[in-house]
Image (tube, rainbow, N blue to C red):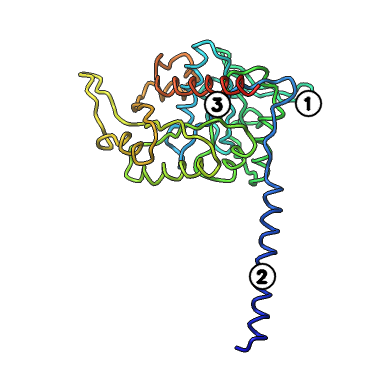
């Protein structure tokens, strides 16, 4: 290869690299920007509940957090970002109910205990209709649930995230001021790999991981109250240590709780005092955020 040919290849490479850099900058400029809530709404803290895969109990943990924070006197809302598999409305007895619009804003529904909820199932004609939306439409719906919804004044908005690390999760992290996430896992062999995906996603988006909750950890014998571990010994602490996370508690397999979710009586039936470490961590994050805001003011 002569020098002229080398120069030609070098020029083409440099041109290609420059074009790639320009495209990257353009993509970053077009990335969703964080927007505030609708005019007149004040949302003090936004907390996400995430997982590396589906079926581990994110909605259950979200519901427990909402109920416990509300029981302590906080004003709480739930944004159900799991658009294709929303379960929050059914858990809270809203099957067949519909959100409505007022003054060009969606109005979230309230549970009997005063928790505000916005979900795709509240805008569908029938709750069992499939959501056959492409990614950009789903992302647009999430942003509408956040910025075009009459949330009013909330101490906490809990975001029940879609499973995995899809573009919808990316939209939430880029569009909402998420202060931290709680990761939910289950005691299975691949748990560290699954948790690792969620941890790395949060790290890439510069969102703090508040800790790890293990769902379906054990069953309590109804006769002797002994804990039975159907998936083997708990790996909560091991997994938390592996990723340098805080272990925020375990939840059992509880048929009564599952039945309450199906019946829509979750808010009334869930026992008090579940996941106390998780609730306290969320409260501490809120207090720290308020302190920093006061200091910067």
Number of numbered discs visible in the structure rendering: 3
Query: For numbered disc 1, what is the local secondary structure?
Result: loop
What residue occupies the far right of the structure in this picture? 103
Between disc 2 and disc 1, the foreground one is: 2
Q: Is residue 7 above or below residue 74?
A: below
- Foreground: 32 or 118? 32
Q: Where does residue 104 sit, x and y in percent of width and height?
A: 78, 26
What residue occupies the far left of the structure in this picture? 224
Marks 3 and 1 close (CB-CB < 8 Å): no
Q: Which of disc 1 and disc 3 is earlier in sequence?
A: 1
Q: CA distance from mark 2 to mark 1?
A: 50 Å
Q: Is residue 19 above or below residue 207?
A: below
Q: CA distance from mark 3 to mark 1?
A: 23 Å
**The quarter of the displayed image where residue 212 is located:** top left
Q: Residues within 10 Å of mark 1 (few under 14, many from 20)?
A: few
Residue found 62% across the figure and 26% down from its top: 118
Q: Which residue is mark 1?
A: 104
- Foreground: 223 or 73? 73
Quadrant in the picture for the N terminus: bottom right
Q: Which of disc 2 and disc 3 is earlier in sequence?
A: 2
Q: CA distance from mark 3 to mark 2?
A: 47 Å
Query: For numbered disc 3, what is the local secondary structure?
Result: strand
Can you tell which mark lies on residue 283? Answer: none
- Foreground: 19 or 187? 19
Query: For numbered disc 2, what is the local secondary structure?
Result: helix
Going by the image, does 76 lie left or right of 211? Answer: right
**The quarter of the displayed image where residue 133 is located:** top right
Q: Which residue is mark 3?
A: 158
Quadrant in the picture for the C terminus: top right
Q: Where does residue 11 sit, x and y in percent of width and height?
A: 68, 75
Can you tell which mark lies on residue 14? Answer: 2
Q: Residues within 10 Å of mark 2 (few under 14, many from 20)?
A: few
């Amino acid at each position: 290869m002569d020098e002229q040919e080398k120069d030609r290849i070098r020029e083409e490479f440099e041109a290609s690299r420059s074009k790639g850099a320009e495209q990257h900058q353009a993509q970053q400029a077009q990335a969703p920007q964080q927007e505030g809530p609708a005019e007149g709404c004040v949302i003090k803290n936004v907390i996400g509940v995430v997982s590396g895969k589906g079926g581990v109990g994110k909605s259950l943990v979200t519901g427990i957090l909402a109920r416990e924070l509300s029981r302590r006197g906080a004003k709480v809302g739930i944004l159900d970002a799991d658009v294709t598999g929303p379960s929050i409305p059914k858990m809270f007895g809203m099957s067949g109910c519909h959100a409505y619009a007022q003054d060009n804003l969606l109005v979230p529904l309230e549970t009997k205990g005063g928790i505000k909820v916005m979900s795709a199932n509240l805008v569908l004609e029938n709750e069992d209709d499939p959501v056959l939306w492409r990614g950009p439409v789903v992302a647009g719906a999430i942003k509408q649930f956040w910025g075009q919804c009459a949330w009013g004044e909330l101490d906490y908005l809990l975001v029940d995230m879609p499973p995995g690390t899809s573009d919808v999760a990316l939209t939430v992290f880029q569009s909402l001021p998420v202060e931290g996430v709680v990761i939910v896992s289950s005691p299975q062999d691949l748990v560290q790999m699954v948790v690792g995906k969620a941890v790395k996603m949060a790290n890439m988006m510069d969102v703090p991981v508040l800790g790890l909750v293990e769902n379906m950890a054990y069953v309590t014998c109804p006769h002797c109250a002994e804990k039975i571990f159907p998936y083997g010994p708990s790996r909560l602490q091991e997994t938390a240590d592996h990723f340098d996370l805080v272990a925020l508690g375990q939840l059992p397999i509880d048929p009564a709780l599952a039945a309450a979710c199906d019946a829509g009586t979750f808010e009334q039936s869930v026992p008090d005092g579940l996941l106390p470490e998780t609730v306290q961590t969320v409260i501490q994050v809120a207090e720290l955020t308020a302190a920093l805001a006061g200091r910067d003011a």
